[in-house]
Amino acid sequence: MTTSDVSSEMSTPVQTCDVCIVGAGITGMNALFVASRYLNRDQKVILIDRRSRVGGMWVDTYDYVRLHQPHCFFTAGNIAWTLGQDRSHLATKGEVLDHFQHCLEVIKQRVQVDELFGWAMESHTESDGIVRITCRSADGRSQVVETKRLIHASGAAVMPNDPLDISSERVRSVSPDSCDMRGPEMAASDTPVWVIGGGKTAMDTAHAVITRYPGREVNLVAGSGTYFLTRDLAFPNGSRRWWDGRVLSTLAADTARRFDGTNEAAVADWYRAKYGTWVTPETGNYLFGVLSEAESSTIATALNSVVMDHLVDAADRDGTTELVFRSGSTTPISPGSWIVNCTGYFNGGDQPYEPYVSDSGAVLSLNLSSITMHLPSYTGYFMTHLLFLGALRDIPLYELDWLELRSKSNAVLPYTLLALVQHNLSLITDSVPTKVLLDCGLDFDRWFPPPRRLPATARFLLTHRRDREHHRRTLDTVRERFGARCGPLDHTANTTSQRSPTASTTA
Ligand SMILES: Cc1cc2nc3c(=O)[nH]c(=O)nc-3n(C[C@H](O)[C@H](O)[C@H](O)COP(=O)(O)OP(=O)(O)OC[C@H]3O[C@@H](n4cnc5c(N)ncnc54)[C@H](O)[C@@H]3O)c2cc1C
């Protein structure tokens, strides 16, 4: 260490707290909600985020994004929304951000929360029961936080999307985050729109353009295609809640039971046919996105063309402009066309692998390289309960490297995630007080009235231990097939490199 290093370390302000949470998205806010249940008013949480406010990706994602599930389920713990809208309302970006702020204010009534917004955690080290976190602000100042427990809730780590880098000078390359589809530039033009991508953002974008500018030419380049869970079946409206649709916990349990680690194509065929909706002729992907039959049909009816391929470039050649695809095929497009990049939001940021819990048990890491549940909100909620109950190192949860598995097989990912959450939820159910389950406002089953919900709960309680062994074998099979990190942590090893999950004999 040089003399200047020593003097800069001595001048760095140090704050202390009982719990530090890094990441103020839905993952971090659920962690904060749970932490506030275990701490008292004299104790302090420091909440750090490199963004300027609470909300995670919702702070700077595109303006026309909407929740795809009924708003009440997108919350911290069981904090109720104050919107006064019908339960089925799909909240806008502004409404979601207001709710995040409301959650923070509600939680602050139980525990002290100091916000360090606009600060990024650069590193953390553990020694003598203290976690030391080094942070830096956007203008280069540094700060140290010392804490007994760190929850590193970088979660999905979604960042705004850039436009695609294409060579043509005759087209407009934008992303939903760089150009509002409902904004003046798009409104002033009537040239064709090419939506690149087939997932939720592509559907949001196609729907926004189609409904805002009726008659405008809209095309979709959908890669291998995506299907969605039909909202009408997952969240039927009005009196239909009493008899129609499917209670989601039983759908998840049935799907995970069908999946054995090798039969993802058959499971996808069954799931899609019974519960799916889609606008493309092929659907290689599913990532728990939700779409209504009405949205699906609006988009499918209005699309001018659907290309099942991956865009490589838009190139100017011999006086014409054409889209160039991965397969080598090309298609001519009109000058002035809009190319809207709706691909690739989930890349996990640049965070290196961290096991979900550190050797000492003081650092809980909730990120895409070591996930334990299928949804960020659930992860923040349940894993933080295990942290405070001191149970994180005692139960053989499986962790999965979402990014690694996705890079090897999109097709296997969703059903593996369902096996993972069923396996881990079974272990968690046996390890937490019943109140933890009762207080979980994130539970989609609450959409349905008690006579439909209670049989689903009873069925889970009766079958989850028996099913656990099947899910464990499924997850082991996926690991062996794809070589992706998927298994329990080895708590006897004491270095990060040794902590890769290994084949398990415990269940
Ligand atoms: C376009 C789009 C639409 C979506 N719509 C829905 C939807 O309708 N419903 C749904 O359930 N899910 C939706 N999702 C999934 C979505 O990503 C999650 O629901 C959720 O909002 C992600 O929350 P998160 O906390 O896991 O991650 P993020 O929202 O990415 O939050 C993580 C936070 O951690 C901070 N952070 C990370 N590392 C550091 C560090 N080192 N220092 C300081 N801060 C750090 C980041 O700045 C960020 O604010 C959507 C995703 C996308 C991309």
Image: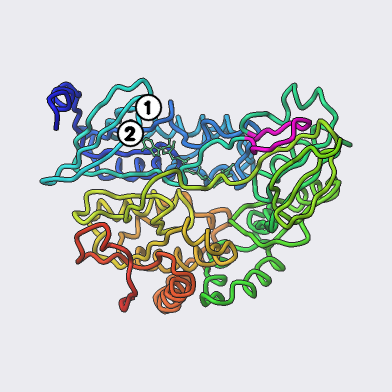
Residue 7: image x %, image y %?
A: 14, 22
In the rendered image, residue 171 lying in the magenta stretch gets the answer yes
Task: In this rendered view, identify the residue nearer to me: 422 or 210.
Answer: 210
Q: Tell me the magenta residue range.
A: 163-176
Task: In this rendered view, identify the residue nearer to me: 399 or 322.
Answer: 322
Which amino acid, mark 1? Phe
Image-based side of 502 in relation to 320, left or right:
left
Badge 1 marks a residue whose secondary structure is strand
Can you tell me whether the CB of the residue at mark 2 lies under 8 Å from the nearest atom of ligand 1?
Answer: no
Kindly indicate whether the residue at mark 1 contacts the one at mark 2 (C-beta within 8 angstroms).
Answer: yes
Furthest-left residue in this view: 128
Image-based side of 363 in relation to 165, left or right:
left
The residue that mark 2 highlights is 47
Badge 2 marks a residue whose secondary structure is strand
The residue that mark 1 highlights is 117
What residue is drawn where x is 74% and y is 35%? 168
Q: Where's the N terminus, which quadrant?
A: top left
Task: In this rendered view, identify the residue nearer to me: 247 or 427.
Answer: 427
Residue 61: image x %, image y %?
A: 57, 34
Residue 205: image x %, image y %?
A: 71, 39
Q: Quadrant of residue 475?
A: bottom left
Can you tell me whether the CB of the residue at mark 1 lies under 8 Å from the nearest atom of ligand 1?
Answer: no
Which amino acid, mark 2? Leu
In the rendered image, residue 222 lying in the magenta stretch gets the answer no
Task: In this rendered view, identify the residue nearer to me: 113 or 165.
Answer: 165
- Residue 84 visible to an observer of this rendering: no
Dot 1 alpha-carbon crowd within 10 angstroms: few under 14, some 14 to 19, many 20 or more:
some
Q: In the rendered view, would you say 168 is above or below 201?
A: above
Q: In the rendered view, would you say 429 is above or below 176?
A: below
Q: Where's the C terminus, which quadrant?
A: bottom left
Image-based side of 472 in relation to 144, left or right:
right
Of labels 2 and 1, earlier in sequence is 2
